[in-house]
Image (cartoon, rainbow, N blue to C red):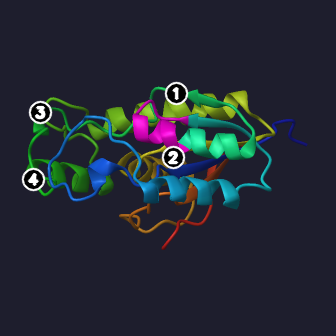
Amino acid sequence: MSLFCPATLIVARHGEAAYTVGSEILSDEDGVLTDLGRAQAAALADALRDRRVALVYTSPLRWAVETGMIVAEALGVQVRQLDGLQEFRVADLAGARFDDDRLTTTYAAWLADDLSPRIPGGESGEEVLARFDEALSSIADLHRGETVLVISHGGAISLGLPRLALGAVPSPPPSLANGAHVEVQAGDDGWTLGPWPGA
């Protein structure tokens, strides 16, 4: 009989942010939640009201923190920022367009399991995956037998979760909508991934 109590992590994408609306320019600057983004965060809180969430972890980026604070206030729990959950940085591509080949081809390679390419001036897929894995693992170690919410970002989640957890996810996975979430459990056999929205 196992004495290991699994941790349940509900990993959600932040609400819609101003930088994602009407902008075609890449940037590493923090965005703020739109009215819709705040509504998405409130809807996420409603969806989790009966889940006994013990704590909310967020990426250090502002729009993720805002999302986490809205959910945490509604659920009556604390918020903790954790480095490693943030989105990959566009680095030297700041100011370029979202469809810049240097970004799209690099991210497509990552999703196809070639993690070696690097965003100019930024991270490789291996580095993004390593720090995302480390962050989730540290959360799971601290919260065995509990359920916690983790607010992160679409690119990091879509790259990280299918490679860290056992579960049937198309490759590449469907884009995760703002406010949508995926559930993972850390148990004796590693990570187990729940249903992927839209898959």
Q: Earlier in the sequence, mark 1 or mark 3?
A: 1
Badge 2 amino acid: Leu
Secondary structure of the residue carrying numbered label 3? helix
Q: Please report whichever mark, 2 or 1, sits nearer to the chain's N-terminal start.
A: 1
Describe the element under mark 2 as helix, strand or loop. Answer: helix
Horizontal side, residue 11 vs residue 186: left or right:
left
From which residue to which does the magenta span run? 58-67
**Residue in the foreground of this view, choosing between 46 and 59:** 46
Marks 3/2: CA–CA distance = 28 Å
In the image, residue 118 sits, relative to residue 10, either above or below, namely above
Q: Dot 4, how many residues are within 10 Å of its Cα: few (below 14), some (14-19), or many (20+)? A: few
Q: Are marks 1 and 4 in contact (CB under 8 Å)?
A: no
Amino acid type shown at disc 3: Asp
Badge 1 or badge 4: first in the primary sequence: 1
Q: Residue lying farthest right?
A: 1
Residue sitting at x 35%, y 36%: 128
Mark found first going from the N terminus, 3 or 4 = 3
Of the image marks 3 and 2, the number of the one nearer the N terminus: 3
Say which amino acid is labelled 4: Asp
Pointer 2 and pointer 1: residues touching (CB < 8 Å)? no
Q: Can residue 66 be spotted in the picture? A: yes
Q: Position of residue 42 (x, y in %)?
A: 60, 55
Closer to the camera in the image, 65 or 139: 65
- Between the residue at mark 4 and the residue at mark 2, the CA separation in whole angstroms equals 28 Å
Q: CA distance from mark 3 to mark 4?
A: 12 Å
| Label drawn at residue 92 | 3
Magenta highlight on residue 35: no
Indicate which disc residue 164 carries: 2
Which residue is label 1 attached to?
Answer: 82
